[in-house]
Image (cartoon, grey):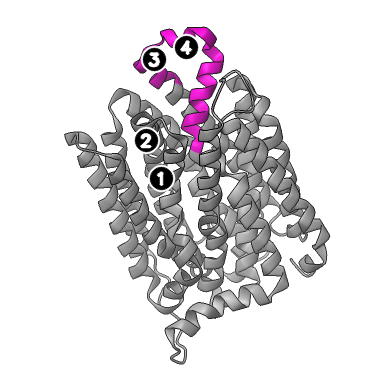
Amino acid sequence: MSADLRPRSNIARVFRYRDFRLLWFGAFFSFTGSWIQNVAQGMLVYELTGDEAKLALVTFCGMAPAAVLGPFAGTLADTFNKRNILVSTQACMSAGALFLAAAAYFGFIAYWHILMVALTFGVVGCFEMPTRQSILGKVVPPEEISAAVPLNALTFNVARIIGPGIGAILYTQVGPQMCYAINGFSYLGLISAAMLIRADLRPIAREPQPILDLMLEGMRYTFKDMRLRTLFVMEGIVSAFGIAYLALMPAFARQLVELQYGAAFATLSSEQVREASSKLVGGAMTSVGVGAILGLLITTAVAHLPGKARLIQIAMSSLAVGLLIIPFARTPWVAFPLFAVLGGSSIIQFNTTNSLFQLLSPERLRGRVISMHVWAISGIGPFGMLLFGWIARESKGDPRSSFQGVPLIMLLGGICVAVGLMWSYRNRRHLEGVP
């Protein structure tokens, strides 16, 4: 294609590739189902337990396996056929969601069932995520990766706009079983995409190496490269302290409903509380998704420009400010725009870091280096969520106070992210040479 006829937009340019389109739409279909389930599951768990720590524990179980397996999971993506891994992992997650659908439908669902399935999803996700992300390097040429990474992440975040509202409505009108069932069948999207992609997803031929050496090679490469190591620490700080509020959103919604109704809250029926809380959860998560979409569009628009490390620092700044302000929100109309800021800021950082990990790593190590990026988010983050869930539970008191429960952990998270930001400026020399 001549330069005159080449699409000028980063979005149009990347969507020219058939395999990328298949991956994008398959992931979008799958993630929409996941968000429908996530919102309904959070409300179900909080109804079953009324405990912020137990609510956070579900997210912890879904992410904790990455703390152990995360640095090594990319070895499979670099060693085995990516197509087979993607199909197998999607099938496993589908089975887990359909089991919970049946448990909810027949009335025997219990909290421990949700924990066990979340743990299973966490283990399987350790291998699915670096595999799916490393496929990007196979379906677009290297010069398009910076634009392809945020566009690929749009699947997750467009789904985050659509899914929560659907999940909240279905949960209120039908029940959690329908949400679980929809998610179970949504995994067919990525299974179909994996089967239809024409790119060669087989591993690169290499000399046989001991499996432990293969596992550790990606970790050593990440921590020896000062640029990757600094980016990893910055991402880990935000993962641990900057996004813990997401797991506790049903508790935040309940607290906001109490603030809105005041003394009249005691007169509400459980159905009225459920409906009001589900609307707030759906609205809040949709706001996060809208912010994430805007963040991804910004990331895509500047993908061809240098200074990605500075973009990450700007994103951390806005995330810290948003977290410090949101505890003072007394109505949804103040909270929702702030949630959009949080969603946009975190997604800019995570996706810019993702593209830098791909750009700064050799192809033979890409899956393993990306697994370190996944580890920074899914391996470190769960411990922050578990800690903040415990703090939120123990600090609950007068609902009229802005610094009880979830608002308190948002304030603490903002302080931690601000400290991490100052550390990054002090070590900015380590980011020299970042594209």
Residue count near mark 1 (Cα–Cα under 10 Å), binned few <14, some 14–19, many ≥20: many
The mark closer to the camera, 2 or 3, is 2
What element does badge 1 sit on? helix
| Residue 177 tag number | none
Residue position marked by numbered label 4 in the rendering: 265
Front residue of 365 and 374: 374
Residue count near mark 2 (Cα–Cα under 10 Å), binned few <14, some 14–19, many ≥20: many
Quadrant where the N terminus lies? bottom right
Magenta region, residue range: 248-276
Residue count near mark 3 (Cα–Cα under 10 Å), binned few <14, some 14–19, many ≥20: few
| Residue 272 tag number | 3
Mark 2 vs mark 3, CA separation in Å? 17 Å
Mark 1 and 3 residues: CB-CB less than 8 Å, in contact? no
Mark 2 vs mark 4, CA separation in Å? 21 Å
Q: Position of residue 147 (x, y in %)?
A: 62, 58
Magenta region's main secondary structure?
A: helix
Residue position marked by numbered label 1 in the rendering: 58
What element does badge 4 sit on? helix
Residue position marked by numbered label 2 in the rendering: 45
Vertical side of 324 occupied by 365: above or below: below
* Residue type marked 2: Val
Q: Position of residue 352 (x, y in %)?
A: 65, 57
Front residue of 109 and 161: 109
